[in-house]
Image (tube, rainbow, N blue to C red):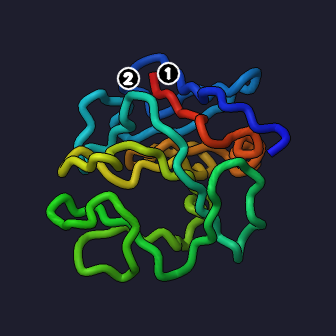
Amino acid sequence: MKNYQPNNITLHTLNAASTTAVLSFGSRHLRCSLGRSGIRSRKHEGDGATPRGKMALVEVYYRPDRLKRPKTGLPVFPLNPTMGWCDDPRDPNYNQPVPWPYTASAEHLWRKDHLYDLLVVLDFNLVPRKKHRGSAIFWHLCHHNFFPTEGCIAIERKEMLKLLERCGPGTRLVVC
């Protein structure tokens, strides 16, 4: 990817309880949404908090019926209506992709709204996975009014597409 720069994307907020922040990448500074409970160092399943820390950008998913394949140095996969993500800490597939519908609690990735038209899996609690530590922590698209997320980080579609062009292996999202 010609514009790929393995720099950190840094997220700054005025206080840990805030549900919005500024996401910085090079000279770009963008508004983003955070979890409804702000930022926490000790994240746990269902707390609505965005985890503090440094997270690798693992892979990108997109809705092929709503947008073209994004340009990025990261692995990219199309979503389909049979994709989910397990959020049940008691299930052996906790915090992993699963088929939809799924027998345990799972989030459906093929949503009617546009929040998951484009999403990046962040490496929070992936390897090793710890039960109850939190699941489905994504960088995805935001609501028009920057409403809080359930613990993810969300930005506007046009801005995410621009940033993804400069992301690849080694790019990390740092939540301060």
As drawn, is 135 to the left or to the right of 5? left
Q: Quadrant of the C terminus?
A: top left
Characterize the local packing of mark 1: few (<14), some (14-19) or many (20 or more) Cα atoms within 10 angstroms: some
Q: Is residue 81 above or below residue 138?
A: below
Pick the front one: 39 or 6: 6
Q: Is residue 23 above or below residue 91?
A: above
Label 1 element class: loop
Cα separation between marks 1 and 2: 7 Å
Residue extending furthest toward the top? 14
Q: Quadrant of the N terminus?
A: top right
Q: Which residue is mark 2?
A: 16
Residue 128, x across and y down, in percent? 28, 46
The part of the image, by quadrant, that contains residue 98 is: bottom left
Q: Is residue 167 above or below residue 78?
A: above
As drawn, is 104 to the left or to the right of 48? left
The part of the image, by quadrant, that contains residue 49 is: top left
Label placed on residue 13: 1
Label placed on residue 138: none
Residue extending furthest toward the right? 2
Residue 142, x across and y down, in percent? 58, 49
As drawn, is 86 to the left or to the right of 169? left
The part of the image, by quadrant, that contains residue 50 is: top left
For image coordinates 55% across by 73% down, the residue present is 112
- The answer to whether mark 1 and mark 2 are in CB contact below 8 A is yes
Q: Amino acid at mark 1?
A: Thr
As drawn, is 130 to the left or to the right of 11? left
